[in-house]
Image: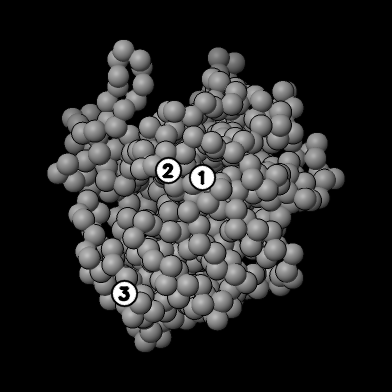
Amino acid sequence: MAHKLTNLLTPVPSDIEIAQAATAIPIDQIASDAGILPEELELYGKTKAKVHLSIRDRLKDVRNGKYIVVTAITPTPLGEGKTTTTVGLSQGLGAHLGKKVFTCIRQPSQGPTFGIKGGAAGGGYSQIIPMEEFNLHLTGDIHAITAANNLLAAAIDTRYFHEQQTPDDTVLFDRLCPPGKDGSRHFSPVMLRRMKKLGIDKTNPSELRPQEQSRFARLDIDPDSITWRRVLDTNDRMLRQITIGQGPEEKGFTRVTGFDMAVASEIMAILALTTDLADMRERLGRMVIGSSRAGVPITADDLGVSGALTVLMKDTIMPNLMQTIEGTPAFVHAGPFANIAHGNSSIVADQIALKLVGPDGYVLTEAGFGADMGMEKFFNIKCRVSGLAPNCVVLVATIRALKMHGGGPKVVAGKPLAHAYTQEDLALLEKGCSNLVRMIGNARAFGIPVVVAINRFKDDTNAEIDLVRRVAIAAGAEDAVMTNHWAEGGAGAVNLAKAVVAACEKPANFHFLYPLEMSIKDKIETIVREMYGGAGVEYSPEAEKRIELYTRQGFGNLPICMAKTHLSLSHDPNLKGAPSGFIVPVRDIRASVGAGFLYPLLGTMSTMPGLSTRPGYYDVDLDTATGRVIGLS
């Protein structure tokens, strides 16, 4: 059902006008054309659906298609059209070259949609439809993550409160395992997990000796060690730091904590990295929320809540099926932050898509932000878990961003661009191409062929595009192609699609940047040196303590997920181009044990964005006569 657009308008209308003018193909037809059986589909209305993971078992003997990861140079605060390029390339491959193709992208947070950034469905004539469904509730996955995350937060503070109120371990044990009317006791399944962890080989609570009862019942949470925070999917700066426990019934057990965005929750990272329900159950159970006063890590399993978390999350594991504006299929699934977590859509979506397209097809998966962030994490974290290796890297670049890296004026969201960005300036552009060269080198460091997509804006000149093309090929790119998919849809990405097809036939020699057996510090320093161009790393006393703690607790072999700004190759958003000689400060290190990585914090990272004086919600409304959403961007 993929189809070429024939009604392109000039000037290009707004994204929502284009999306609402398009006629969406019924999602069951999209599924059927993609090879999904009716019994493998859960419909959510006429334009979106979830698909069952059983597809992988049915198609297990089908060879995978070609696997392409889409990344970018270091962006301006406006973004350089990575999602738009991913969608346009999909349309070029499917609607114009007749290839079997699947697009796999992240679900956006609702917070930025009503803030400054707007939605993330692509743009112009290269976007996912329906745009409103994509950018808002979709099938409720983020709401489920919010519910699960906050249930765990409630479980932590509840357990701490009751343990403080119950100094007698025998009484605490009796409350956790109360006798029934016949006097018998039993352990729930999650309690048996804790018994196994403690090495107590008993299944009957009545058989536990007093010492064993104490070990089982008292977690002895150190409140200063708690790292788990509450989340919501709204930009609300006033909740960044709060004090809880101020009600009269809480008897003075107050604690300072705060809220993060829902997409920053470790549970979101787990959704993106899990491979099936059993794996999700294990990952949720081993999430570490803090330590006991003796320094023992405390997990969701220890708190007895992990089974309930899995129940809340059971439907989220199924990828969400949607379509591009030219009728090529797309999975929209998971949306972890790219500067806090790993910034990639789900493994299961990629796995299913690769089977559905088969050996002659193509799967595009997008990695958040630049090739120093989402792409590095895609290779070192996501590919380790999935066992998949891509055939090609598509690196999105814009003349605008390269001029910024050359020393152009500051680019500020909501303000007009300076003249340097709207007039030809080859000298400024050539200087800024240092960032492009470094990013091509980052991708090639993993042994994968690179194609540069030069995302054209209206003021870009042919001379500027030719310059970027020459620099990219000299730096080792297989090709560098101008694309105009925003204005032309898939037709504007046909040459890029041909370049990607050719690159996928080139030999690849994929390898990781570091072995997991490296020490925590060695892994951090390898990323800083090889990906960022830094000269070294400086650790705060707090970071040193965390490294010692996590190594002692057995987490030292986890991969590293750097939390840093996306606006520079370095830790400092003001350092543009390809800086060198800088020292990266690691102020702290956190553990996402359930997701399976450690994340060092480089500088101050906001996990709860604020709203500006005039947020995007001013423009969003409903036409009550037609029921149509208006003003969404």
Q: Earlier in the sequence, mark 2 or mark 3?
A: 2
Dot 2 or dot 1: first in sequence order is 2
User: Circle 3 sits on which residue?
Assistant: 425
Label 3 or label 1, whichever comes before in sequence order:
3
Task: Give the residue type that dot 1 points to.
Answer: Gly
Decide: is 267 above or below 42: below
Cα distance, mark 2 to mark 3? 26 Å
Circles 2 and 1, Cβ within 8 Å, touching? The answer is yes
Residue highlighted by disc 1: 489
Relative to the observer, which residue lies in front, 55 or 159? 55
Expressed as whole percent of the image width and height from the top left, the position of residue 410 reads 23, 66
Q: Secondary structure at mark 1?
A: helix
* Three-letter amino acid code of the residue under disc 3: Asp
Quadrant, the C terminus: top left
Element type at mark 3: loop
Q: Is the residue under label 3 in contact with that under label 2 (CB below 8 Å)?
A: no
Numbered mark located on residue 124 in the image: 2
